[in-house]
Image: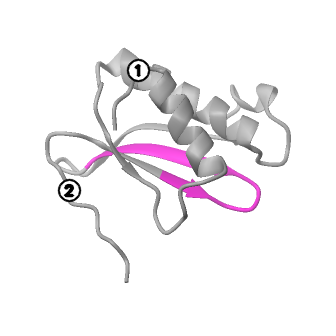
Amino acid sequence: MKKRIKIKRDFPRLYVFRSNKHIYAQVIDDSKNITIITSSSICPNLKIGTNENTTCKTAQIIGQDIGKKLRKKGIKKIVFDRGKRMYHGKIKALAEATRNEGIEF
């Protein structure tokens, strides 16, 4: 049975999608139905620090980028949404890197 995330209107949601080649992260405001911030392994400015294959190192870079962008926007608390993926490997690396930037889940 799939667990559902309770949508908290106070905090935006960080949604992480991982494919076989890339990893994508979006910060979504569910109350306004808009995407606030996005980052992925295909972004031109982040492609320099990553290689073609998605690794935990790539996920850390994406997590750091999302954390920096959230701090610039003044957002300190978010809800983490990993979809149907288990919390380990690349998903965990992205979450830990975002937490290291000072963002609370």
The mark that comes first in sequence, 1 or 2, is: 2
> Among all residues in the image, which is located at the extreme front?
88
Q: Position of residue 20 (x, y in %)?
A: 74, 62
Taking depth in this image into account, of 36 and 23 the one nearest to the observer is 23
The circle on residue 7 is 2
Q: Name the residue rendered at 70%, 29% in the picture.
A: 46
Q: Is residue 46 magenta?
A: no
The quadrant of the picture occupied by the N terminus is bottom left
Q: Residue 88 appears in which quarter of the rendering?
A: bottom right
Taking depth in this image into account, of 2 and 18 the one nearest to the observer is 2
Vertical comparison of 89 with 6: above or below: above
Residue, disc 1: 102
Residue 21 visible in the picture: yes
Vertical comparison of 89 with 10: above or below: below
Left or right of residue 86, residue 61 in this image: right
SS type, badge 2: loop
SS type, badge 1: loop
Q: Position of residue 86 (x, y in %)?
A: 55, 63
Q: Main secondary structure of the magenta part?
A: strand
Report the amino acid beneath label 1.
Gly
Q: Name the residue rendered at 57%, 40% in the picture.
A: 94
Residue segment shown in magenta:
16-29
**Mark 1 or mark 2, whichever is nearer to me:** 1
Q: Name the residue rendered at 28%, 62% in the picture.
A: 5
Taking depth in this image into account, of 84 and 48 the one nearest to the observer is 84
Q: Is residue 26 magenta?
A: yes
Report the amino acid beneath label 2.
Ile
Q: State the separation of the CA atoms marked 1 and 2.
A: 22 Å
> Among all residues in the image, which is located at the extreme bottom?
1
The quadrant of the picture occupied by the C terminus is top left
